[in-house]
Amino acid sequence: MRLVALTTDFGLTDPFVGIMKGVIASRAPEARVVDVTHGVPPQDVLAGALVLQHAVPYFPPDTIHVAVVDPGVGSSRRGLCVETSRALLVGPDNGLLSLAAPPADVRRVVHLTEKRFFLPRLGTTFDGRDVFAPVAAALATGTPPDALGPAVADMQRLELPAPVRDARGFRGQVVYVDRFGNLVTNVPAVALPAGTATIAIGSARIHGVSSSYADGRPGELVAVRNSWELLEIALVRGSARSHLGVDVGEPVIVEG
Amino acid sequence: MRLVALTTDFGLTDPFVGIMKGVIASRAPEARVVDVTHGVPPQDVLAGALVLQHAVPYFPPDTIHVAVVDPGVGSSRRGLCVETSRALLVGPDNGLLSLAAPPADVRRVVHLTEKRFFLPRLGTTFDGRDVFAPVAAALATGTPPDALGPAVADMQRLELPAPVRDARGFRGQVVYVDRFGNLVTNVPAVALPAGTATIAIGSARIHGVSSSYADGRPGELVAVRNSWELLEIALVRGSARSHLGVDVGEPVIVEG
Amino acid sequence: MRLVALTTDFGLTDPFVGIMKGVIASRAPEARVVDVTHGVPPQDVLAGALVLQHAVPYFPPDTIHVAVVDPGVGSSRRGLCVETSRALLVGPDNGLLSLAAPPADVRRVVHLTEKRFFLPRLGTTFDGRDVFAPVAAALATGTPPDALGPAVADMQRLELPAPVRDARGFRGQVVYVDRFGNLVTNVPAVALPAGTATIAIGSARIHGVSSSYADGRPGELVAVRNSWELLEIALVRGSARSHLGVDVGEPVIVEG
């Protein structure tokens, strides 16, 4: 029995996630369900795609990842099951699944059309409950992906804003902010200058890239290679977001 | 081994829910525990009752639902185990269990008096840990409900404020607001006028009932039949609560 | 297969906890994982230590408790596995584990040095993923603690600020505030005067210690013996924190 992992923007205040788990428990009683997070900012498909991309490698092979950040629920956007070398990804075709499924790694994209695997529909506002949870349960109990609908050639893809490289370094931006107020950028850690770099963000200038938060003194801004292998700006024992007053989209310039 | 589902207002900031799970794991090691939600607004018994009502149908038959929203903990209010055709409901006798247990569906109401199933009491401020979790563990390991105490004839009932029907339509109100700021009303979707309805809420007038959020443009207010089969007011890709500045209790008038 | 319980300050907004669960599921597929809480205030080691101390007794014997509140991640602070009569505690050596491991109850302290049990390191900012989760998985699959590194004689200890006793009673302070705004003090309930006590906090005076919140009227401040066997100040059906405008550190004087 495989693992079902859930990534949504449903939050934990309402019973939406609990109801999805009820559906999975009803249809795949032996399946084990793990939460990746339900704290994706509401309707922020890019943040959800980033989260999924960085979570999938840490889960067992063949985990069934259900992801729902779905501002277009009820529209004609398709539901998909994407099979990669690493996982089965189930969710809306709005780009959410795409960062975790680079084209070279995609084995099959299935359009979820076989309604016999869905819940009897009451409405069109909660596909997490009515479509994606029961499809995950079907997969968990051995239904092969190609029974869920026809294979299709394409899927919506979302590109992370790419950092711009020039002679002096990188011009990137903040793409994610975590609970601690750490600012995750789109600048890959492997591409950072080997020697001394200067990182400019907002009104601040940071000299050098640390290997950990602990390299700075409390209250000091540091630039670190983070756990997603991206450049991250942090305030030691504090919140860089609050300290700098910046958020997702803030430009970051790396020179050196 | 049956499923234990938890619905509380304990939040996830403190270890209260974790401690309840520790108690269940200690006394019923094989039981599987699923969270419905712990985000019921603090001490809001009606919101908790609504959540439980709409979650129970999606869980496997005979799930043991423990619900704790309990402003009267430590008072003389009783603890109950309510057996319905669908589930066992365990929690305080303050109306919390009542919307999930319509009178015609109640098979038995047991007053939890048999202290041998409780934890040795340290205080009277945390019945979730001391009474309801160990009782759920007892049920999960096969204790029949009638071993937990005497059957009683009555339980506290909570009535959802009913919408008022008149010649022109319904006068209802907002009864729940979700994380997205969607406004759930007490107007049943099945009772909506078949033709074109006009929905008035705050200063807004909405024409027609959509089948999904996707029927509107971003920033537009829509009225939808929601996943609980109730009339819901939503702002496409935004928060109707913030946009309208309204909350639970706001009147909603449906005409047409 | 033993239970793994998680206590962190990671919150549930980001995928950090989910990724730790992915690592555990990958390396110990049969392990059961339970959340104590991930809502410890960011980098508040004392709050985390209190939470762990009060949660451990309610979990099955030999539960593997992983705790991560770790402002010094990436520094030279050690990682530990502490074996007590009751549990295995895994986490940073910064005092976090110490309240749950009173000296008389410690059987062994192991310094986590055996990197073959860690994840291949990508960075030094997320030991929860790279060190503590895989070590917990190793323990859950039967690795004995002493295979994880050398036994050491000492560990960082954190002392709860002790209440000061004088002829008139206790001078203590608020050490934890829960979701409901209840103010937990460091005054042990067993030490409260047997007769009528007067509790002074902020501008308020409370007469007598109640056995439950229900002894007061809505809106009234009460002093109760709480579920952690400590003196707690609560506002019946409200938030004492908001009502009094006080927080952790606020002095509390008990006389009587």
Image (cartoon, coloured by chain):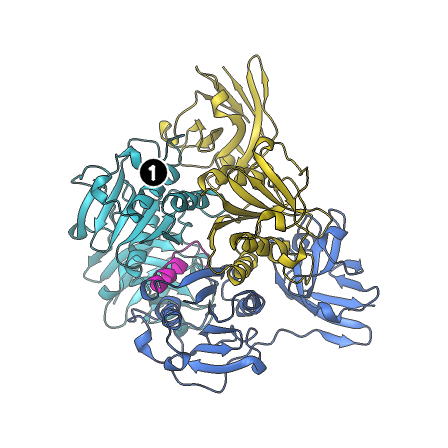
Chain colours: A yellow, B blue, C cyan
Q: Name the image quarter holding the N terminus of chain C.
A: bottom left
Left or right, A116 with respect to B56, comes to right
What residue sits 40% from the left and 76% below the top? Answer: B75
Residue sitting nearer the eye, C29 or B256: C29
Residue sitting nearer the eye, A120 or B165: A120
Q: With respect to residue B20, does C25 lie above or below?
A: above
Q: Residues within 10 Å of mark 1 (few under 14, many from 20)?
A: many
The range drawn in magenta is B11-25
Q: Is residue A42 visible?
A: no
Q: As shown in the figure, which amino acid type bears the numbered disc 1?
A: Val
Q: Main secondary structure of the magenta part?
A: helix
Q: Residue furthest bottom?
A: B153
Q: What x and y, as percent, mark residue C146?
A: 20, 42
Residue sitting nearer the eye, C175 or B221: B221
Q: Is residue C196 visible?
A: yes
Q: With respect to residue B226, does C95 lie above or below?
A: above
Residue at numbered disc 1: C131
Numbered disc total: 1
What residue sits 60% from the left and 37% below the top? Answer: A98
Q: With respect to residue B171, does B38 lie above or below?
A: above
